Amino acid sequence: MTIRAVQTRKAPTVGFSATTAAPLSQAVVHGDTIYCSGTGPLDPETRTIVSDDFAEQVAQTLTNLVAVVEAAGGTRASILKCTCYLRHVEHFESFNAAYRQFFADNPHFPARTTVIASPHRAGVLVEVECIAAVER
């Protein structure tokens, strides 16, 4: 079975320093399954955090995630499972509200795991990765 890496300019490419490319793909497709790396609240062009506001960070993070899924051949509705990382437990309720609104038009909510953890970049309050199906 073929494995292919996915890159799109519609979502930020993560870099750990100005001179070092990150050792990861935005997503990898194996068969009909898309495995997306974690993405956060970065502007796709500037790679800067879009806002200090948590709800805005969630919206940008999920928008970035869907851009990668679409580049890989999936859709928002084909997202099967999300793993979500929140910096602060106090954001859990507002994360649920933003997540619910983002996926409101889906025929189902993706399966989900939410973990309280510190993303590696200062100022990032949320990161999300997912597994999705390729739409045929």
Image (cartoon, rainbow, N blue to C red):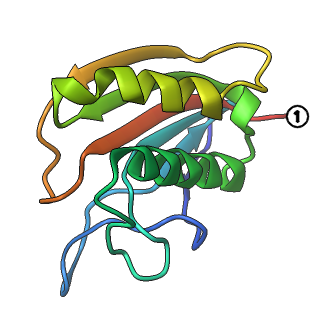
Q: Which of the pair 78/114 is nearer the observer?
A: 114
Compared with 44, 3 (above or below) is above
Q: Which residue is mark 1?
A: 136
Q: Which of the pair 69/110 is nearer the observer?
A: 110
Where is residue 93, by image quadrant? top left
Q: Residue at x 35, y 63 (%)?
A: 51
Q: Which residue appears farthest toward the bottom when viewing the image?
A: 19
Query: Left of 10 or right of it: where is 17?
Result: left
Q: Provide the secondary structure element on which disc 1 rests.
A: loop
Query: Left of 22 or right of it: where is 98?
Result: right
Q: Residue at x 33, y 65 (%)?
A: 14
The picture places residue 16, in percent across and down from the top left corner, at 18, 69
The picture places residue 36, in percent across and down from the top left corner, at 48, 42
| Image quadrant in which the C terminus is located | top right
Q: Residue at x 82, y 34 (%)?
A: 135
The picture places residue 72, in percent across and down from the top left corner, at 67, 50
Compared with 47, 100 (above or below) is above
Where is residue 22, by image quadrant? bottom left
Q: Which of the pair 35/93 is nearer the observer?
A: 93
Q: Amino acid at mark 1?
A: Arg
Count of picture labels: 1
Q: Which of the pair 73/105 is nearer the observer?
A: 105
Query: Left of 91 or right of it: where is 77?
Result: right
Q: Residue at x 11, y 40 (%)?
A: 118
The picture places residue 31, in percent across and down from the top left corner, at 66, 32
| Image quadrant in which the N terminus is located | top right
Crowd around label 1: few <14 · some 14–19 · many ≥20 (10 Å): few
